Structure formats: structure tokens, C-alpha cells
Amino acid sequence: MRSIWKGAISFGLVTIPVKLYSATEQKDVTFHQVHREDGGRIRYKRVCTLDGEEVPYSDIAKGYELATGEIVVLTDEDFDDLPLSTSRRIDVLQFAPAEQIDPIYFSKSYYLEPDGQGAKPYVLLRNALEASGQVAVVKVALRQRESLATLRVRDGVFVLETMLWPDEIRAPDFPFLEEDIEVRAQELQMAESLIQTMEAEFDPTEYHDAYREALQQVIEAKVEGKEVIAPPGGEEEAGPAVDLMAALRASVEAAKREREPSKPEKKPTKEPKRKPRKTA
């Protein structure tokens, strides 16, 4: 892994130099836009809509459009003057129980590695945070954007998880929330039974990206000049349940069958041959 940022955790009067690494990566199959006839790459030019001239990258600035349609042009110098006090610091603001932070706030995860002489204070804070059972709420600036974040420990390493600001979370404003929908006690009990039947320890390695794997097979078949065979489709999407109780009951039974260990088939036992009776 290659570090993408260097800074320090500021914890009271303690400063811990750290390096930042992306903790996740997308495994999407990437494509280029090409000419269908000859496979040539499609390239785009940066053209000004006013004079039609191609613009070099060095002459491109950021523009903010007003409600009137006018554009306010901002230069790199304008951004340099912004008061990002945490530009090279991860400031610890408070400590809080992890369950108090709604996961909807989390944006992206990063690993933190101690840098230089920071190993001992790093391990000290890590052990203290792990023993407390809490997470640190911090503030950090990455790529000219200030964010709230949390610090937690995973596999002996600090994980920095950037967060969205409260005004970036949309309110769920849906009509059904205003409706008086009645749920019968029997339906609720059956739904709870279905949940209990499907309970299991979460193991992420049990799941895989079937679409990406099928797409990779199509690409490999194309490379080898083989006929592309469409992967088997999934089950047809079921429509809305007409009888909710019947659907829940059938779901519980299906879940129970999937959880039952497969029993080996019993081999039929041969009946012992009867000895012929002696005649007098």
C-alpha cells in the first residue's frame, strides 16, 4: 500500500505522527469508451463553450454558479487562504460509545500507521482506546475538505472513518410514514420467527460478487475466441405477496430446510434369504 497523506493525531498535549492509507478498494471491472468499428480509444477535448477554443489544463479554474446563472471563478489562491486549521492534524474532539453514532454518517475508511518515532504513543493510545470500548470523534482535512471522523481499532491498527456532516443526511420523507398501517400480532410473530430462523454469525467470506465473476468470464471467453455463454439467470423476481401470513410461513419453512444439515441417504438393507422348509 502507498500512503496518501501524512500528518499527526493531536490528543491533548500528545502528538502522534502517522501515515494515512486507503483501507478499501473497489473491485469493479473497468472499461474504456472505444470506437465500435476499430476499438480506438475515444478522447475528449476541454473546449470553452463561449469561444469554442480548446483550453489547456493550466488555464482551468473552479467556477460556482449562482442562481442568476452567473459564474464566480475561484483560483487556487482562494482555496489556499481558507482557514483549514486541521490541514495536517487529526484533532481528537471527544470520546463516545460506538453505538451512539449512526452508520449512515460513515463515508470512507482509512488505515493509520505510526510514522517515525510515533510507534510508542500510537500503541499507548490504541490500547487505551481499545480498553475504553469507545471511539474517538475527530476532525480532519483531506483533499481540501474538512470532515468529522471517528478513530477505532481494528486488528491492532487505527481505522479513521470519515463522516458526513448532519446537513448532508437526507430526511426520509415518504408518504407511507403518514399512513396508519395496521400489523396484526400473528404477522409480527411470524416475521420475528423468520428472523430467528435466519440468524447466523456473519462471515463476509461466504459472499461473492456473482455479477463481476460472470462479467470476467465473458471477457476471458472473448479473449480466447470462444463462444460467449450467458450465465444462468437468477430466480424470477416475485411479485407482492397476496397473503402475507402464507408468504411468511412459507419463508420460515424454506429457511428451516436450508439450515438443516443434509442427511446421507440410507442404503436399502437386503432381506436375509429364507431357508426352504424340510418336508416330511
Image (spheres, helix red, strand yellow):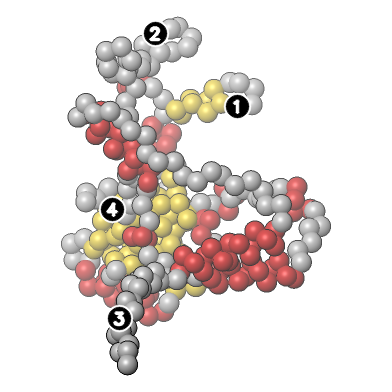
Location of residue 134 (image quadrant): bottom left
Q: From the viewer's perspective, is 226 left or right of 27?
A: left
Mark 1: secondary structure:
loop
Residue 53 badge: 2
Question: Residue 193: percent from the left, percent from the top?
Answer: 60, 71
Judging by the rendered image, the residue that carries numbered circle 4 is: 21
* Label 4 vs label 3, nearer the camera: 3
Q: From the viewer's perspective, is 109 left or right of 100?
A: left
Q: CA distance from mark 3 to mark 2?
A: 100 Å
CB atoms of marks 4 and 1 within 8 Å? no
Mark 3: secondary structure:
loop
Mark 2: secondary structure:
loop
* Label 4 vs label 1, nearer the camera: 4
Judging by the rendered image, the residue that carries numbered circle 3 is: 273
Q: CA distance from mark 4 to mark 1?
A: 37 Å
Q: Residue at x 21, y 60 (%)?
A: 115
Instruction: Say whether disc 3 or disc 2 marks the residue closer to the N-terminus.
Output: 2
Instruction: Say whether disc 2 or disc 1 marks the residue closer to the N-terminus.
Output: 2
Q: Indicate the amino acid at tag 4.
A: Tyr
Q: Residue at x 45, y 6 (%)?
A: 51
Q: How many marks?
A: 4
Judging by the rendered image, the residue that carries numbered circle 1 is: 66
CB atoms of marks 1 and 3 within 8 Å? no
Q: Residues within 10 Å of mark 3 (few under 14, many from 20)?
A: few
Instruction: Say whether disc 1 or disc 3 marks the residue closer to the N-terminus.
Output: 1
Q: Indicate the amino acid at tag 2.
A: Glu
Q: Residues within 10 Å of mark 4 (few under 14, many from 20)?
A: some
Instruction: Say whether disc 4 or disc 3 marks the residue closer to the N-terminus.
Output: 4
